[in-house]
Amino acid sequence: KLARSRFFWMFFDNNVLGAFREFLFGTGTPEALVEKLEALQALLPPVEEERAQGGPFVVGRWSMGDAGVAPSIVRLPVILECGLGKYTIGEGRKMLNSLRSPGLARLMKYIVDASAWPSLKNTWDEVSDT
Protein backbone atom coordinates (compact mmCIF):
# COMPACT_ATOMS: atom_id res chain seq x y z
CA LYS A 1 0.00 0.00 0.00
CA LEU A 2 2.87 2.35 0.72
CA ALA A 3 4.24 1.89 -2.80
CA ARG A 4 0.81 2.51 -4.35
CA SER A 5 0.37 5.64 -2.24
CA ARG A 6 3.79 6.96 -3.17
CA PHE A 7 3.26 6.19 -6.87
CA PHE A 8 -0.03 8.14 -6.83
CA TRP A 9 1.73 11.16 -5.36
CA MET A 10 4.69 10.93 -7.73
CA PHE A 11 2.41 10.49 -10.74
CA PHE A 12 0.56 13.63 -9.73
CA ASP A 13 3.79 15.60 -9.23
CA ASN A 14 5.44 14.37 -12.43
CA ASN A 15 2.43 14.49 -14.78
CA VAL A 16 -0.70 16.26 -13.58
CA LEU A 17 0.92 19.22 -11.86
CA GLY A 18 2.89 20.17 -14.98
CA ALA A 19 -0.19 19.95 -17.23
CA PHE A 20 -2.16 21.97 -14.67
CA ARG A 21 0.53 24.65 -14.52
CA GLU A 22 0.76 24.83 -18.32
CA PHE A 23 -3.00 25.18 -18.61
CA LEU A 24 -3.12 27.96 -16.00
CA PHE A 25 -0.36 29.91 -17.70
CA GLY A 26 -1.99 29.58 -21.11
CA THR A 27 0.62 27.31 -22.67
CA GLY A 28 -1.31 24.04 -22.28
CA THR A 29 -4.68 22.79 -23.48
CA PRO A 30 -7.72 21.54 -21.59
CA GLU A 31 -7.40 18.28 -23.51
CA ALA A 32 -3.86 17.69 -22.26
CA LEU A 33 -4.92 18.34 -18.67
CA VAL A 34 -7.99 16.10 -18.98
CA GLU A 35 -5.75 13.32 -20.31
CA LYS A 36 -3.51 13.55 -17.23
CA LEU A 37 -6.50 13.75 -14.88
CA GLU A 38 -8.00 10.63 -16.47
CA ALA A 39 -4.71 8.80 -15.91
CA LEU A 40 -4.66 9.95 -12.27
CA GLN A 41 -8.27 8.84 -11.85
CA ALA A 42 -7.32 5.38 -13.14
CA LEU A 43 -5.03 5.02 -10.11
CA LEU A 44 -7.95 5.42 -7.69
CA PRO A 45 -9.87 2.34 -6.55
CA PRO A 46 -13.39 2.00 -8.00
CA VAL A 47 -16.15 3.46 -5.84
CA GLU A 48 -17.66 0.02 -5.30
CA GLU A 49 -14.43 -1.12 -3.61
CA GLU A 50 -14.37 1.71 -1.03
CA ARG A 51 -15.91 -0.35 1.74
CA ALA A 52 -13.51 -3.27 1.22
CA GLN A 53 -10.54 -0.87 0.93
CA GLY A 54 -11.45 0.96 4.12
CA GLY A 55 -12.24 4.35 2.58
CA PRO A 56 -12.42 6.47 -0.58
CA PHE A 57 -8.74 7.34 -0.93
CA VAL A 58 -5.93 5.91 -3.03
CA VAL A 59 -5.26 2.97 -0.69
CA GLY A 60 -8.63 3.15 1.07
CA ARG A 61 -7.68 5.03 4.21
CA TRP A 62 -6.00 8.48 4.09
CA SER A 63 -2.34 8.07 3.18
CA MET A 64 0.84 9.96 2.45
CA GLY A 65 -0.13 9.98 -1.24
CA ASP A 66 -3.42 11.68 -0.48
CA ALA A 67 -1.68 14.19 1.77
CA GLY A 68 0.63 15.08 -1.12
CA VAL A 69 -2.02 15.31 -3.85
CA ALA A 70 -5.12 16.63 -2.09
CA PRO A 71 -3.98 20.19 -1.24
CA SER A 72 -3.45 20.93 -4.93
CA ILE A 73 -6.25 18.92 -6.53
CA VAL A 74 -9.02 20.26 -4.28
CA ARG A 75 -8.19 23.77 -5.46
CA LEU A 76 -8.60 22.93 -9.15
CA PRO A 77 -12.40 23.39 -9.34
CA VAL A 78 -12.21 26.63 -7.35
CA ILE A 79 -9.46 28.05 -9.57
CA LEU A 80 -11.52 27.22 -12.66
CA GLU A 81 -14.76 28.61 -11.18
CA CYS A 82 -13.01 31.90 -10.35
CA GLY A 83 -11.41 32.12 -13.79
CA LEU A 84 -7.89 32.37 -12.38
CA GLY A 85 -5.21 31.85 -15.00
CA LYS A 86 -3.96 33.11 -18.33
CA TYR A 87 -5.88 30.64 -20.51
CA THR A 88 -8.14 32.05 -23.20
CA ILE A 89 -11.67 33.10 -22.35
CA GLY A 90 -13.95 30.10 -22.27
CA GLU A 91 -11.19 27.53 -21.71
CA GLY A 92 -11.65 27.60 -17.93
CA ARG A 93 -15.37 26.87 -18.24
CA LYS A 94 -14.60 24.13 -20.77
CA MET A 95 -12.10 22.58 -18.37
CA LEU A 96 -14.53 22.85 -15.45
CA ASN A 97 -17.24 21.12 -17.51
CA SER A 98 -14.77 18.35 -18.36
CA LEU A 99 -13.89 17.95 -14.70
CA ARG A 100 -17.57 17.65 -13.81
CA SER A 101 -18.35 15.23 -16.66
CA PRO A 102 -19.19 11.56 -16.09
CA GLY A 103 -15.76 10.64 -17.45
CA LEU A 104 -14.08 12.21 -14.41
CA ALA A 105 -16.79 11.39 -11.87
CA ARG A 106 -14.49 9.22 -9.74
CA LEU A 107 -11.88 11.98 -9.57
CA MET A 108 -14.52 14.55 -8.59
CA LYS A 109 -15.70 12.22 -5.83
CA TYR A 110 -12.10 11.99 -4.66
CA ILE A 111 -11.88 15.80 -4.63
CA VAL A 112 -15.08 16.07 -2.58
CA ASP A 113 -13.94 13.35 -0.16
CA ALA A 114 -10.49 14.90 0.21
CA SER A 115 -12.02 18.33 0.81
CA ALA A 116 -13.89 16.88 3.77
CA TRP A 117 -10.76 15.35 5.34
CA PRO A 118 -10.20 17.12 8.71
CA SER A 119 -6.65 18.38 8.08
CA LEU A 120 -7.65 19.84 4.72
CA LYS A 121 -10.94 21.19 5.98
CA ASN A 122 -9.17 22.96 8.86
CA THR A 123 -6.58 24.63 6.62
CA TRP A 124 -8.50 25.42 3.41
CA ASP A 125 -11.49 27.72 3.46
CA GLU A 126 -12.70 28.03 -0.10
CA VAL A 127 -14.43 31.36 0.49
CA SER A 128 -11.72 33.26 2.36
CA ASP A 129 -8.78 31.66 0.53
CA THR A 130 -9.93 32.66 -2.99
Image (tube, rainbow, N blue to C red):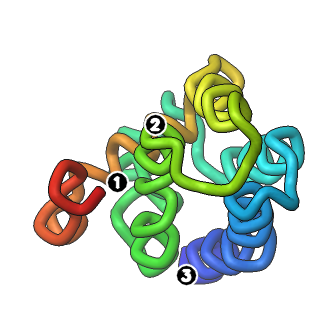
Q: Residue at x 48, y 66 (%)?
A: 72
Q: x, y (%) of residue 25?
A: 73, 64
Residue that badge 2 annotates: 81
Q: Earlier in the sequence, mark 2 or mark 1?
A: 2
What is the three-letter code of the residue carrying label 2? Glu
What is the three-letter code of the residue carrying label 1? Ala
CB under 8 Å between callouts 1 and 3? no
Question: What is the CA distance from the residue labelled 3 to the residue labelled 2?
Answer: 34 Å
Q: Earlier in the sequence, mark 3 or mark 2?
A: 3
- Residue 2: numbered disc: 3
Question: What is the CA distance from the residue labelled 2 to the residue labelled 1?
Answer: 18 Å
What is the three-letter code of the residue carrying label 3? Leu
Position of residue 89 in the picture relative to residue 108 (left or right): right
Viewer-closest of 130 and 113: 130
Is disc 1 surrounded by few (<14), some (14 to 19) or many (20+) residues within 10 Å?
many
Viewer-closest of 89 and 2: 89
Question: What is the CA distance from the residue labelled 1 to the residue labelled 3?
Answer: 18 Å
Q: x, y (%) of residue 12?
A: 68, 69
User: Element type at marker 3?
Assistant: helix
Q: x, y (%) of residue 4?
A: 64, 72
Q: Residue at x 40, y 75 (%)?
A: 67
Location of residue 82 (image quadrant): top left
Viewer-closest of 118 and 87: 87
User: Element type at marker 1?
Assistant: helix
Q: Residue at x 35, y 41 (%)?
A: 112
Is disc 3 surrounded by few (<14), some (14 to 19) or many (20+) residues within 10 Å?
few
Residue 97, placed above or below residue 40: above
Position of residue 97 in the picture relative to residue 116 (left or right): right
Residue that badge 1 annotates: 114
Which quarter shows the C terminus? bottom left
Position of residue 126 in the picture relative to residue 70 (left or right): left
User: Element type at marker 2?
Assistant: helix
